[in-house]
Amino acid sequence: MKDINKNKKIIAWGGDATFLKCMETNPLNIDYIVDNNRKKQNTYFNNYFIYPPSILLNESINDTIIIIFTIQYKDIAKQLEDFGFQWGINAFSFLQLSEYKDLYELICQKEDFFFMENIVQKDWICLDIGANYGMFTKKLSKLVGPKGFVYSFEPQPFAFAGLQEHIHDYSLENVKAFNLALTDNDSKAELNMLIPTKDGSTSSGRALISTELNQDLKQIHQKTEFDFYENNEISVKSKSLDFIITENKINKVDFIKIDVEGYEMYVLKGAIKTIIKNKPLLQIEIAFSYHTNNNFNQINELLSPHGYKTFISRKGKLLELEEQSPVEGEINYYFLSNKNYNS
């Protein structure tokens, strides 16, 4: 973790709840805030004025420090580098600073993030598929302990760089990261990934693999604040999970978390041998509101012959779905085999 020179001018990037929580815990002498969100610019947030990022061109780089108050900081790091700031010297994520090293879980608002404590056990082998910047990876690393292990998969270059930084900065010695997308067969050496933009900066949290689903997703998101995907397509390497398991001689798998924005069935089909052999507990995010290719039903049809039942978390407990129908919204479903259910 790093300490910052508090004698320099400190500017915050991002005016939202993360900034507030950090300031409440360890307030810094912030001069002002910058943000890509045009709706926030030229307004006040917590008594700080919010400017567009272009104001940073007027600052003395050697006398200024930028702190990014958002989990997906690598999306913004490129903008700062274009302005002349150097990552790790005068531009940082709040997660890289010693002042905020214990805030990782405080920032996270997802119920399922904390619910993992009820299901993931010491010494387990866990997979984080769609790891992004490593929020769940870090949580899993802590839960499984030094004798357990976490394998994390993230295809996006910016997000993967952030994942690697978290592994290094938090000394996650029981984690191995793969810069890969997981898919249904190994003939797909590379896949097209679409990354949306928001007010001119990329938004890795909504990136998705190109499939027939994309047209539906585009129509939904174009009605939101996203400029979306048309001009930001990259090629990413891919393998099946079954191939990775064999290649890396992974002898058991206890838990798999999947968050891949509509690509769930492709991941699961390429992992079916691993699932049948190990019967791991599965946590899969499915967004019924826009995943119109019937992912929920397809996943149930794939898993139920292997003894899996479907659950959701409610108030710290697993609730079995009596009717195999999705819940409206973007939530995590838990698929438990007879092995998990009876233990």
Image: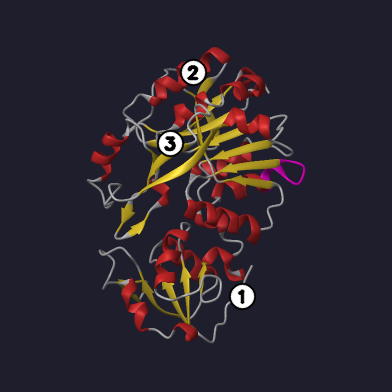
Label 2 SS: helix
Q: Which residue is the site of mark 1?
A: 3
Mark 3 or mark 1, whichever is nearer to me: 1
Is residue 147 one of those drawn in magenta?
yes
Secondary structure at badge 1 equals: loop
Q: How far apart are marks 1 and 2 (CA)?
A: 50 Å
Q: What residue type is disc 2 on?
A: Leu
Residue type at mark 1 is Asp
Residue occupying the point 56% across, 30% down: 282
Taking the image as drawn, is residue 253 in sight?
no
First in sequence: mark 3 or mark 1?
A: 1
Labelled pair 3, 1 in contact (Cβ < 8 Å) = no
Residues drawn in magenta: 142-148
**Which residue in the structure is indicated by mark 3?**
331
Q: Distance between the residues labelled 3 and 1?
A: 37 Å
Whether 220 is among the magenta residues is: no
The image shows residue 123 at horizontal and vertical percentages of: 74, 38
Q: Is mark 3 on a helix, strand or loop?
A: strand
Please tell me which residue lies in front, 141 or 319: 141
Q: Which of 157 and 88 is in front in this view?
A: 157
Which badge, 1 or 2, comes first in the chain's sequence? 1
Is residue 248 found left or right of 222 in the rendered image? Answer: right
Nearer to the camera, 137 or 151: 151
Q: Which of marks 3 and 2 is nearer the N terminus?
A: 2
Q: Can residue 95 be seen in this view?
A: yes
Quadrant including the C terminus:
top right
Residue carrying label 2: 302
- Is the image coloured rainbow, by chain, by secondary structure, or in one colour? secondary structure
